[in-house]
Amino acid sequence: MGRGGIRPWEAIGRYRRYWLSTFILLPAGGAALVLHRVLADRLPPGLEIPTLVIFALLFAWISAGFWTALVGFVLLIRGTTDTAPGSPERRLAEPRPRSRVAILMPIYNEEVERVAAGLQATYKSLQQAGALAHFEFFLLSDTRDPAIWLREELVWSALCQALNAFGRIHYRRRPINNKAKSGNVADFCRRWGRDYEYMVVLDADSVMNGETLYRMLEMMEGNPQVGIIQTQPLAVNRETLYARLQQFAQHVYGPIFSAGLRFWQLGDGHYIGHNAILRTAPFTEYCALPVLPGRAPLGGPLLSHDFVEAALMAKSGWEVWFVPSLPGSYEEVPPTLIDDLKRDRRWAQGNLQHLRLLAGEGLRSAHRFLFINGAMSFLAAPLWGLFLILGALGSLHWANASGDGRMGLFDWHGLADPVPFWLVGITATLLLSPKLMAVLWVLYQRNQRERFGGVLHLTVSMFFESLFSILMAPIRMAFHSQFVLQTLMGSGVRWGGQVRGDQETSWREALRTFGWCSALGLVLTGTLYPLLGIWHFVWLIPILGGLTAAVPIAAWTSRPSLGRWARRHRLFVIPEEVRVPPELRALAADSVAYLPHIDGDPFVQVVVDPRFNAIHTALQRNRTSAWPRAASLCHKALEKGPQELNSRERNILLSDRQSMLALHRAVWSMADRERLAAWGLADEAD
Amino acid sequence: MFKDESSYSVNPAAEPSADWAAEAMVVANNAPVLARVERYMARLSLTDVQRLWIRGQVVAQLRGVKMEGEALYARAFACMHMALATLTDGDELDARLDLSLDLPVGEAHDGRSSRWLQQRMQPAMARTNMASRPLNRSWGAAFLRRFQSLLNRRAIGASRRALPGEA
C-alpha cells in the first residue's frame, strides 16, 4: 500500500484553492453589490433579492471558468504545468516484469465493428511500442440485444484470430447488467481484479496510443501513492458540423482549461470514467459505489459514477491526478445536438445525485467542489432562465412605474446608467476572454498554427464557433432547465446505448425535438418587442434568436456534408486531421474488413452456420436448470420458425450449449421445405 | 486438431467390386440427402481429402438403411458429424471449431478446442469482494466535523513547535 506519507502538494493545493475561492467569491460579491446600487431604488425587494442572489451565483460560476483559463494560460506560456511537487510525471519507474494491466472496454449495444477497430488500433499501438507483455484487454459486454451479442462474440474470436491474441483479448458478457457501466467494471474487479495490479478503463469509442499507456504504467509504478491517473481525451474523428465545432472547441480551448484545472486540483483530481489508469486493489476495496436511499432519480444507484469513484479513492488516502500533458488519448463526441442533449440528460440526473453526497464524511473538499461544479453545469441553466425572467419582470415593473411603458433596465429615467454596461462588459469578458487566450496560446506555438488551418482560418473558425455557441446556449438552457425540473420532479432516465456514427438529424426529427424551442422564441419575440422597445430588445436578440433558430440549427449542424465542406475550407480543423496519428489511421473502416459479416438474422445464422454455431456454442455452458424451458423453446423454434421467438426467448436458447447444438442438428435434419425456408435453408430442400 | 491426411485414404479400390456397386446405389438413392451433406461441408473449410473421406463414411453408413424423410436426413447428418469427430479424434464441435478458427496445429489444448477457447475468452477467476462502505451523509454531522476540525487546527497552531531539522 502506497498511501499516506508525505504529500508535498497538499499544502500547495490548499493554498491555491483558497486563492481560487477568493477570486471567485470576492468579485461575485462585489458585482452583486454594484448591481444592488443600480436596482435598490428601482425594484421592490421581492424582485431585487432573488435577482441579486442568482446574479452572484452565475457570476461566481463563470468567474471560476475564467480564473481557471487564465491560470492555465499563464502556466502554458511559462511552460511550468508539470512542476508541482509530487506530480506523477516527475517520478517514472520502469514497470516490473510481472506488472499486469487490464484494459477494460465496457460496451452496451454498441456498433461492434467500431469497438473492434478501436481495440485493434490500441492493441497494435501497444505492440509497436513493445509494451504488449504488460497488457491484456477485456471486452466487458452488457449488451441485451441477442443480435449484437452474437456479433460481439464472432468479432471477438475473429479479432483474436487476426491479431493472434487469444489469451490477451478476453470477452465477458454479463447476464444481468446491474448498476450499468460501474457495475460492469465492478464485476471485472470481483472476478479478475486480483490478477491485475492496474486497470485502464476505456469507453467504447476510446483509442489510446501504446506509448501513452506505457507511460501511464511507468507513472503508476513510480508513484505507489497514486490511485488514479486521468488523461485528457481529445475529441476526434467526427464529420458532422456539430461534432466538428465541438472537436475544434475542445482542441483549442481545452489545453488552457486543463492546465488550470490541474493547477487547482493537484493530487485531488477528477476521473471521467474512461481513458484513465486505476490501481485495482484500492479501487476494489474503497470505490464500490453507495446506493442512495430513496427512489430514482435522486435516490438509488448513482448514475454518474466517475466523480464519486475519484472522491472515494481520495477519501481513502490515495491520490488522483489529472495529467493533461499525456498525448495520444482519444474519444469521440456525440455527432448531433440531439445526441449531445441525450447524454446531458443522463449527466444531469447523475450530477444532481452528487449533491446528496456533499456532506459525506471524509470526502476531500476539492471533490465536494467538483460535485457542486458538476451540478452547477446543469443548475446554471434554470438559474439563467430565472435571471432572464426576473430581468424582464423588473423591466416591466419599472416601465409601469415610470408610466411610459417602454423603458428598459438600461435606460431608466432617460439616464443612461453606465454601471449595467460595465457589468455586461465584465460578464462578456469573463465568458469570451478564455477563447482569446486559447487562440493566443495556439498562435504562441509556431508548430501548432498550421495544424489548426493557419492563423486566418483559426481566427475565422473561432469566430464562427463562438457564434454557434452563443446561438446554442439558449437551446441548451431550455433543455438543461427541462432536465433539472424533470429530475427534481421524480422523472428518471433509463440507461441507453449511445450513437457513435455520423447520423443526420432529419427536419422532422429536429422539428419534433426542438419545435417547442423555436415556438417559444417566436412567442417571446412577439410578446417582448412591443413591451420592451428596440433598445432593450436588442440585448435579447442572441437569446431569442438562438431559441427561434433551434430547429434549423439542429438540422443543419447535424449534416456531415457541411462538416466536410468546412474541413475542405480549412475551418474547424484540428491537429489530428492535419497529421493523422497512426492509431487513428488504424481506425479506417477497411482495417476491420476481415471481420465476419453476418447476413440477415444473426440468431438464424448462429443456429445454421456450422462455423458460427461452433464458436458461439463452444463459449456457452450447459444450463441444466433452463433445459425444460429451453426444450419447449427449441420445439417452438423448429415448429413455428425463429421469427416467433422474442429476444428473451432467444437469449435463453443462446445461453445454453445443448440447446444450440440440438437446434443446429435439428435444422439441418429437416425435410420440410417451408420450415427449412424459415431458417434460410430453402436451397437445401432439393 | 485434424488427423494427418496420410493416415487415411479416400481412393476407391482399383477394381470395381460389389462394395463399389452398392455405394453407387446408395448415392443414387439418396442424392438429396448427400447434396445437403455436401452443402454443409462446403460451409466448413475442409480440404478435398477430408471432405471426400467424410462423404465416403456417410455413404457407407447409409448403406442398407431403410429410412426416409427427416429420419434419413438426421441419420446422414449424424454420420457426418461422427466422421468429423473421428477426423479429430474428439468431438464434432471441436472439429468445427478448429476449422472455424483455423487453430494452429500443435497448440496445447489437448484436442478440446471448446474448453481452450472458453479459457481464452475468460481467464480463471480469482474472486475478490467489492462492497460499498458506509458513508455518513448527515449534514448535522458534517457541520459538527467542520467545527471540530477548526477547533483542532487552532489547538495545533497554538502548540506548534519546531522539530529538530524542521525549517
Image (cartoon, rainbow, N blue to C red):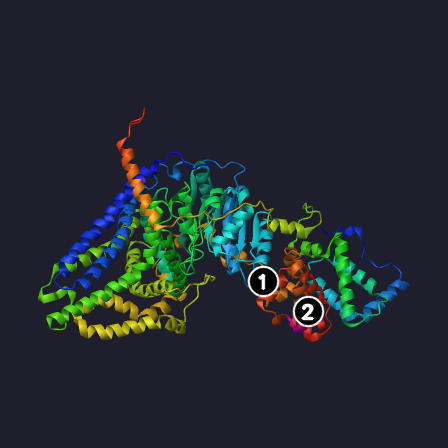
Residue under numbered circle 2: A635
- Magenta part, dominant SS: helix
- Name the residue nearer the viewer: A528 or B34: A528
Mark 2 / mark 1, whichever is N-terminal: 1
Q: Say left or right for B31 vs A116.
A: right
The span picked out in magenta is A637-641
Q: Is residue A564 above or below residue B146?
A: below
Q: Can residue A216 be seen in this snapshot?
A: yes
The amino acid type of the residue labelled 1 equals His
Q: Position of residue A152 (x, y in %)?
A: 56, 58
User: Which callout, 2 or 1, points to the residue nearer the camera?
Assistant: 2
User: Toward the viewer: A609 or A194?
Assistant: A194
Specify few, some or many for label 1: CA neighbours under 10 Å numbering under 14, 14-19, or 20 or more: few
Q: Does residue A250 lie above or below A664 as drawn?
A: above
Residue A414 in the image, given as x and y percentages of width and height: 9, 67
Q: Quadrant of residue A404?
A: bottom left
Residue on which disc 1 sits: A597
On screen, residue A415 above or below A529: above
Q: Type of residue at label 2?
A: His
